Amino acid sequence: KHSAKPNLPPGPWKLPILGSIHHLLGEHPHRRLRTIAKTHGPLLHLKLGEVDLVVITSPDLVREVFKTHDLKFASRPELLVGKLIFYNESDFALAPYGKVWIQLRKICNMELLSVRRVKSFGFIREDEGNRLMERIRAAAGSPVNLTEMLLSAANATVARAAFGKHCAHEQSFVLAMKKTSKYLSGFSVVDLFPSLTFLGEISGVRRGMQRVHKDIDEILNEIIEEHEAKGLKGDGEGEDLVEVLLKVQKQGGLNLLLTHNNVKAVILDLFLAGTDTSSATLEWAMTELVRNPNVMQKAQAEVRKALKGKTKVEEKDISKLPYLKNVIKETLRFHPTTPLLAPRLCRETVELGGYTVPAGSRFVVNAWAIMRDARWWEDPEKFMPERFEKLEALDSGGAASSEYIPFGGGRRICPGMAFAFASMEYWLAVLLFHFDWELPERRRPEELDVEEAFGLTLTRKNDLRLVATSVAA
Ligand code: HEM
């Protein structure tokens, strides 16, 4: 008689079967969810089909979930793409919390994306930076598609880091990954009604995923065979990431028998999480620099003064560019490329903010809304890199603060921060040192649009086309 209903967080009214899905229509989810939070508060409950979704829009709650209750929120929801493309969740970005995730994350932190390893890829970033510069120079004053060029540099960098210098499969692999990312939103019908398996069949999604998986698997098998045939050097110098993973597999000594599927799935993670996040951030940085000529001048003056007399930017110069670093931090605040972070799964029932979040709920943090909220940010709609000169606590790129969370937080915080900053800072320095930038047809800076395309990564809707003028060194 008195079976107590859980005291769920508030949320908008729900329809039978669909739940709250209709409230998310018409605008990008991070924008709709901010509007809903303004009415119902910073802790929301929505029912999306069969899924309970809890949304957080306040730094206090962020602190609670990433610090006090981190372990309870450290899992990821099961998505069809994880099963069908990521080798039945043999990776660690989509894997639930557990033995596999713990071991793979350890390998990632200590071997794949450690500061030492990221440093060892400096020559790749410099090569790709030079290639970027030459492609822009070759355009000789006609508009260049920076969106496409930055994505190509990011893809090539991860591909070379993962597979080694000469990988014949780079292009076909990148293409297959592009197809994969469209299945990853977590908001698709197959993931909102997981019990209705026939939806995957009639929509063709299941077949599409199986086809992409087959293509990816063939390429990765060949790459692994080539690496095995070549033999593993084992000296730690100049190793690519496939070599590192195969070496760890051979050495054993982990709490996990690392399978070939683990190796392949981890490589997929690095591509999916590590390519368009970095290129989209740079694309937004260049957008804001063109829209804010004073900021552009200040950043260019810094880099040109620090590198006076040089003909090329070197990685070691980046430490002399604090303003440029703040331009990137401000871009990540203003245009976080994963505005709702990556969805988590609540492993146990938790009391949060006076409400009950039931075990099994999916949960997201509206990082975009928090980082544009005037309660926590002065002039939040203004692009102002100077704000980071005062905010020492935010220097670590996110881990230290619950208002600045472009990389998430807690145990599942992005492990690719060092990799991302190294490429983004270097390439931005190259773009600003060698070129002046303006809009085609001498359009005014304020005419540059900031429309968003929502996919897994928040990119510009329209490609960024700018005219570059070479500056004499
Ligand atoms: C501007 C660039 C980037 C941004 C904004 C970004 C952001 C994020 C965010 C928000 C998450 C989810 C964290 C959470 O659940 O709390 C994440 C996870 C992850 N990122 Fe990044 N990321 C970037 C670059 C990279 C790069 C370059 C790599 C690797 C090469 C990478 C690898 C990963 C992986 C593997 C995960 C999953 C971690 C796990 O579940 O344990 N990311 N990233």
Image (cartoon, grey):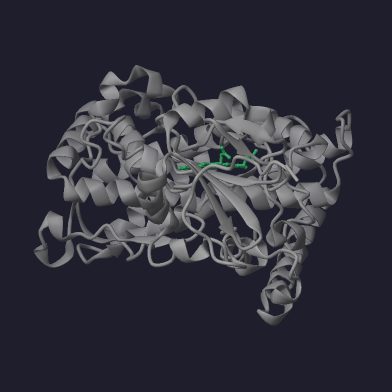
Residue 425: percent from left, percent from top: 38, 37
Seen as rendered, the residue at the extreme bottom is 202
Examine the rendered structure and indicate whether residue 129 appears above or below residue 378. below
Q: Nearer the viewer, residue 242 or 383?
A: 383
Residue at the image point whose x is 35% and y is 18% from the top = 392
Q: Is residue 239 left or right of residue 218?
A: left
The answer to whether residue 70 shows anywhere in this view is yes
Q: Is residue 204 left or right of residue 224?
A: left
Residue 214: percent from left, percent from top: 76, 69
Q: Where does the C terminus fall, quadrant-wise?
A: top left
Q: Quadrant of ligand 1?
A: top right
Residue 441 quadrant: bottom left
Q: Is residue 303 left or right of residue 366?
A: left
Residue at the image point whose x is 67% and y is 65% from the top = 193
Residue at the image point whose x is 54% and y is 30% from the top = 354
Residue 385: percent from left, percent from top: 25, 33
Residue at the image point whose x is 52% and y is 63% from the top = 21
